[in-house]
Image (cartoon, coloured by chain):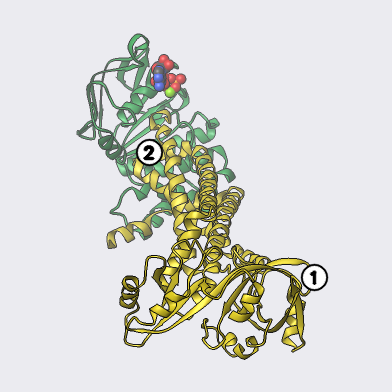
Amino acid sequence: MIGFIQQLQRRTPLGWLQLSHEKGRLLVALAGIAFADVLMFMQLGFQNALYDSNTRVSRAMSADIILLSPKALNLQNLSTFSRRRLFQAKDVPGVQTSTALYINSITWRNPQTRLNATVQVLGFAPDEPAFDLPEVNQQLDKLKLPDTVLFDRGARGQYAEAIAQVEQGKTTTTEVDRRTLTIAGLFSLGASFGADANLMVSDQTFLRLFPRRDAASVSLGLIQVKSGYNPQQVAAALESHLPEDVRVLTTQEYLQFEENYWRTASPIGFVFGLGTVMAFVVGVVIVYQVLSTDVNAHIKEYATFKAMGYSNSYLLSVVFEEAIILAFLGFIPGAILPLGLYALAANATALPIYMTASRAVFVLVLTVVMCALSGAIATRKLQSADPADMF
Amino acid sequence: MAIAISVQDLNHYFGQGQLRKQVLFDINLEINTGEIVIMTGPSGSGKTTLLTLIGGLRSAQSGSLQVLGQELCGATPQKLTQARKHHGYIFQAHNLHSSLTTLQNVKMGLELHREIPPTEMKARAIRMLEQVGLGERTNYYPDGLSGGQKQRVAIARALVSHPKLVLADEPTAALDSKSGRDVVNLMQTLAKEQGCTILLVTHDNRILDVADRIVHMEDGVLKRNTASPVG
Ligand SMILES: Nc1ncnc2c1ncn2[C@@H]1O[C@H](COP(=O)(O)OP(=O)(O)OP(=O)(O)O)[C@@H](O)[C@H]1O
Ligand SMILES: [Mg+2]
């Protein structure tokens, strides 16, 4: 190892000298790699935002175990099951509370623009807090008034003025069908791909908004486990206690279930995955172009080195040195630019798009692989550097 | 005196099957250590081919070819690469690396020799450049040098590692007579200082006087193998 480092110290950094001697070519290469990196970051960022945003409501639920209909697909397509299962659940040892959650989408009039918009309504009994959101739980009393709602600050769409109005304490109203709703308070959850905005209401208000839903058919059951009990074991007990017409999942399993839906059943995960692959391929092509041009430009010099006694593997190492230098130098602008683009995208879409360390490492690894792959293809041309043609 | 190069019954063919064509016929040549031998001959007679075979740039096909005590006929590519490390080459074209400075180019001739520490590599490269009269130009790139200067850098690169054998293919062809003369004198002095053997191909009659011996190639056959009239 020490010997290797000593060899490295005495070695002329040929790859770097070749790259830096051709400033124009180097800049083109770095721009290309940065471009590929930015594309990858955006694709992966959106993909992650999709999974994050779609489980945000579920992650805020205050529950250890969640009951749902076996027909449920995702939060926007939950179907319903009988409320009696919630009462029955209370017989299982370890169950502390079991609360009903009613969820449905509704078209309301945007209080600011007066245009129709679809929002997701979450209804629950104000006596039994369904969410781990302190802001919501402080305003439960407001929900006890009929046709009163709490509104999501992170909603997608033109709501800024309406939100400012509520924040100043002014009464803000809007309509659903011919019913007048009062926005009495705010909370922060954020939009998702499935829903532009969330409304919190009492179960009573919910049933008034959806006359065709009845109190006995619930969307989700939120179960809290007594301290000292293992949610996994309680879930197993519930599973065997309750009939087949209800599904029992721990909260963790439920989050996976939802994420899995978006990953597999929706095309979105595939689209963003494909986008990342395309960006990678674009990067390989660009770096290959640069490296093979470089090898061609230096083929005489390489043949000379061979004639001097340098081995093929030495020349390979020069091309790979170039590949690795390109990867790291190109990654710097390729990782900085997305920071700004993420902020822009987060503003425009109200989705949680942000840089994570693990994604940065992942893209760096992809960049190195991308450049090494291009380097490996480009080195095939080295074989044509024949020292016998040099004399 | 020890023998540096010993060629016996060497034949060489280019091409395959119908196109197979013999370019070297029963070559026999012995060169002693420290000798300067010049090879002349018309274009296409096979001089470069013989030089590339002796230099280990091509693998010899038949006969025997002993260079610095190593049999190169039928040698593996690895063995040829290894053998080349002990030769100094001077090409007809300078073949310097355009992205490297004069100093870096000369250092490339030393990097192969792992026993030389980095500080000594630099010192030796600078000393070598001073000897070829380019001590002031160590940080120039080849593009900034004249043809003769480039050829002198190439000579410095070939000789800096003190090779036991120097092979040169028309090193003065691209130079005017004055710089050509300088280059040859330089090779002669350095060779005498370092005690190495030189085989030099040239068409240039004005430099024949540096040779201890002149051999003449014609149509793939070594015609004359005599001591030079001067040496
Ligand atoms: N790679 C090759 N493939 C086929 N034939 C070749 C090859 N290289 C050289 N030859 C042929 O071999 C013969 C000898 O070539 P060589 O290059 O050794 O001549 P030379 O004496 O060096 O000539 P010059 O003085 O012009 O450099 C020529 O007829 C040439 O056409
Ligand atoms: Mg020739």
Closest to the observer, B52 or A214: A214
Quadrant hosting residue A115: bottom right
Colour yellow maps to chain: A
User: What is the three-letter code of the residue carrying label 1?
Assistant: Thr
Closest to the observer, A172 or A349: A172
Q: Is residue B221 visible?
A: no
Q: Give the percent coordinates (x, y) of residue A253.
A: 40, 69
Closest to the observer, B130 or B95: B95
Share a chain, discs 2 and 1? yes
Indicate which disc, 2 or 1, sits on the residue closer to the N terminus. Answer: 1
Q: Which residue is mark 1?
A: A113
Say above or below: A371 vs B96.
Answer: below
State left or right for residue B70 relative to residue A363: left
Q: Secondary structure at mark 2?
A: helix
Quadrant hosting residue B15: top left
Label drawn at residue A306: 2
Colour green maps to chain: B
User: What is the three-letter code of the residue carrying label 2?
Assistant: Lys
Q: Secondary structure at mark 1?
A: loop
Instruction: Give the tally of numbered discs.
Output: 2
Q: Residue at x 36, y 23 (%)?
A: B49
Say above or below: B195 vs A272.
Answer: above
Label drawn at residue B67: none
In front: label 2 or label 1? 1
Pointer 2 local density, CA inside 10 Å: few below 14, some 14–19, many at least 20 = many
State left or right for residue A271 relative to residue A245: right
Q: CA distance from mark 2 to mark 1?
A: 74 Å
Q: Residue at x 38, y 18 (%)?
A: B46
Q: Give the percent coordinates (x, y) of residue A198.
A: 62, 73
Q: Quadrant of the C terminus of chain B?
A: top left
Q: Chain of mark 1?
A: A
